[in-house]
Amino acid sequence: MFTSRFPNPALLLFLVLLASTAAAKDEEDSSTSGAGTPGEAAMSLDEVALELSHPATSLVYMDNRFEFRDYQGNLSDAADQSAGRYEFETAWPIALKNGKNLQLRAIVPINADQPLYEMGKKDFPEWKVRQYADVLPTDSYFTQGHDHLDDITLGLAYTNVSDTGLLTLFGARLVLPTSMDLSSGRDQFLLGPELAVGKVASWGVIGATVSHVTNIGGDGGYNTNMSEIDVFFAWSLGKGWQIISNPKIEYDWEGVDQNKLMLPLGGGVSKTFRIRRTPIKLDMELYKYIESPEALGPDWMFSFRLTPVLFTP
């Protein structure tokens, strides 16, 4: 499914289980000696896992997400394409006097081996293929973009989890044109709203974040209008284990017919543990795209996440 450049999912699963086993003694020690801050010391592994499973978390974290994608499509050799992506995300909630939080968030992505479709002397990355799929020849060829920093996303949100477990988030996100690859970057400033609603309970959490971004500056040669529904679901199994599903549904309003929707289906497993006094959450998920752009779009996606907690503000 994945190219030899990317880690074998079975190997990653082995590493997760090995890390969990190696951390077992530290979990026991931490449960008696406490975590790094008074707030963390009062939280069990299941409570930490739950807090890290939804976007309105009160924890300060550093999320490291690795994604590996295989592609499909009717362009020549589309099914032979694959790509990797690393995202570093951190969120800093600021407690307000009314008991709610003002959350600052940043996402810094790095792309690896992104497929570029060639037409003449022009490169067409995945997003541009969706917009020009009706005029692109199907018998051209792909090249690979170089590893590079992609566009950075900044977010500001007003969040709350009520006493009844109702989760709400109202905010906005700004995408900066920081891509270091001129062949694949949009070179645009993107801005739009985001809204999340969910339910947090003792068994776990379920909900979704809906967002939309549009171009407000930069390259005016084309438009960007992208909507996302980020579903979050976690079912607690105890001792820091969870069954999870976090599909990202994307809709490109600027894509031509049959090249707009990306709809994945899947899920995975998560384990939260402590190494010394630091809570760490490990996630592994596998998704099959049951709907994907006709010309070029993802077919399978495997993700691996490692999220240490810094502290509770």
Image (cartoon, grey):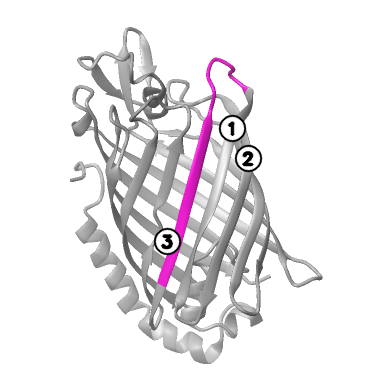
On the image, numbered disc 2 is attached to which residue? 192
Neighbor class of circle 2 (other Cα within 10 Å; few <14, some 14-19, many 20+) is some
Q: Is residue 78 visible?
A: yes
5 or 151: nearer the viewer: 151
288 or 52: nearer the viewer: 288
Neighbor class of circle 3 (other Cα within 10 Å; few <14, some 14-19, many 20+) is some
Mark nearer the N terminus (1 vs 2): 2
On the image, numbered disc 3 is attached to which residue? 306
> Which amino acid is tagged 3?
Leu
124 or 4: nearer the viewer: 124
The segment highlighted magenta reads 218-234
- Label 2 – label 3 distance at C-alpha: 28 Å
Magenta span main SS: strand
User: Which of the numbered marks, if any, corresponds to residue 200?
Assistant: none
Tell me the element at label 2.
Answer: strand
Contact between labelled residues 2 and 1, with CB atoms less than 8 Å apart: yes
